[in-house]
Image: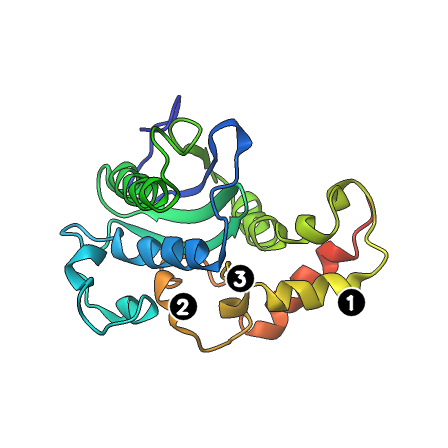
Amino acid sequence: MARNLNISIGEFYHIYNRGNDKREIFLCETDYVRFQVLLYLCNDIKGIHIGDYKNSSISIKELLNLPREETLVDIGAYCLMPNHFHLLVKEKIEGGTSLFMQKLSTAYTMYYNKKYNKTGSLFGGRFKAKHLDSDQYLKYQYSYIHLNPVSIIDDGWKNKKIIDTKKAKNFLMSYEYSSYKDYLGKDRKEGAVLNRGPFPEYFSNSTKFFEMIDEWLSFSN
């Protein structure tokens, strides 16, 4: 369970965690893809295990088409960074977020430790959660979460105006490890991770979403 926060059914939360001692938790494309698939597979009361398909011809991304029994949370947005991740979730059932995060963290840690011959915990303690208790705070998360990758090419951009906004936009468009492209209407398998229906419809179309991102990128502190 997240510290000092009661997670309630029907409420929205910003969930995040980072590598232990800020170590990188995604070292290559395969790691990012694995985590994206786990976002889908671990979000199920029953649970689907990748190991069950180890000897089959199904690809990792094709696992995103497998049927699920009942999801634990609704995921509205996500972003994976080299040493941390962000999720926007809505609690569906009592304890759903905690169970989902437990399954997700355990599954990815087991994969990571086996692949890189490591032991012990990968993440820096239990997941962190912020209650998005206002419409303004919730809407802001769509910008905050999706703009995180800009830090990869412009560290510290949040404290200064970005000079080359075109470069930043092009980078975001090329970044495969967030739900940014899903909000721009791109058809891709990773879109199965999201269930946007239970979230407020802030963006009537992809243009509205892009306009919001453009406004934040052009914002000068």
**Front one among 109 and 16:** 109
**What label sits on residue 122 in the rendered view?**
none
Name the residue rendered at 44%, 28% in the picture: 124
Q: On the picture, is 31 further left or further right than 207?
A: left
Label 1 sits on a secondary structure element that is helix
Tell me the quarter of the image containing the N terminus.
Answer: top left
Q: Give the number of the mark in front: 3 or 1.
A: 1
Q: Earlier in the sequence, mark 3 or mark 1?
A: 1
Q: Amino acid at mark 2?
A: Gly
Amino acid of disc 3: Tyr
Residue beneath label 3, please?
202
x 36%, y 39%: residue:
117
Q: Amino acid at mark 1?
A: Lys
Q: Quadrant of residue 76?
A: bottom left
Image: 213 above or below 2: below
> Looking at the picture, how far across and down is residue 24, in whole percent?
52, 40
Q: Which residue carries the number 2 mark?
A: 191
Quadrant placement of the C terminus? top right
Q: Residue at position x 22%, y 57% from top? A: 50
Whole-angstrom CA distance, mark 2 to mark 3, is 18 Å
- Name the residue tied to disc 1: 166
Residue 89 location (% of width, % of height): 39, 48
Q: Is 50 drawn above or below residue 136 in the view shown?
A: below
Q: Is residue 70 visible?
A: no
Farthest front residue in view: 117
Mark-to-mark CA distance, 1 and 2: 25 Å
Provide the secondary structure element on which disc 2 rests.
helix
Q: Earlier in the sequence, mark 1 or mark 2?
A: 1
